[in-house]
Image (tube, rainbow, N blue to C red):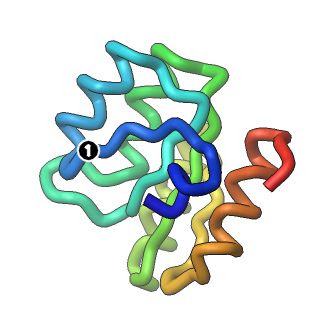
Amino acid sequence: MIFELRGFECMKAYNAEVALEMALATPPDLLLTDVMLSRMNGIQLAIELGKSIPAMKVVLLSGQASTAQLLEDQKALGHEFEILAKPIHPMELIEYVSQRLNIQA
């Protein structure tokens, strides 16, 4: 909702499988997802979508220190992501996403 109030066009999914379907049907400019999801984690989702949507930017969020190992594992496979720590202030998140998309917040 905070993104929509700032003029962003958003799609919402409540699990990785639905997000994957939605993004493949309507490719997004940016994926904003938590790392810890059921069945498929956010890193796996980003990698899978990146195969079909290579220009898509990725913003990962996590509140768990255990995600550092997931990042290291993927980095060894050639996938590098940055994770923002939760909690994050909404305005800080909007600013970060705006920077990734090269637009004014």
Specify the quadrant of the image occupied by residue 38.
Answer: bottom left
Residue farthest along the left direction in this orientation: 39
As drawn, 28 above or below 91: above
Q: In this view, does 53 lie to the left or right of 23?
A: right
The residue to which callout 1 is attached is 13
Dot 1 crowding, Cα within 10 Å, few <14, some 14–19, many 20+: few
Q: Is residue 18 left or right of residue 9?
A: left
Q: Which residue is drawn at 19% across and 48% down?
A: 15
Which one is nearer the viewer's eye here, 98 or 48? 98
Q: Where is residue 29 in the image (x, y as percent from the top left)?
A: 60, 29
Number of marks in the image? 1
Q: Where is residue 91 in the image (x, y as percent from the top left)?
A: 67, 73
Q: Residue at x 60, y 82 (%)?
A: 89
Q: Position of residue 34 (x, y in %)?
A: 39, 62
Q: Where is residue 46 in the image (x, y as percent from the top left)?
A: 45, 39
- The N terminus lies in quadrant: bottom left
Specify the quadrant of the image occupied by residue 47.
Answer: top left
Q: Is residue 95 left or right of residue 17?
A: right
As drawn, 40 above or below 23: below
Q: Residue at x 39, y 79 (%)?
A: 66
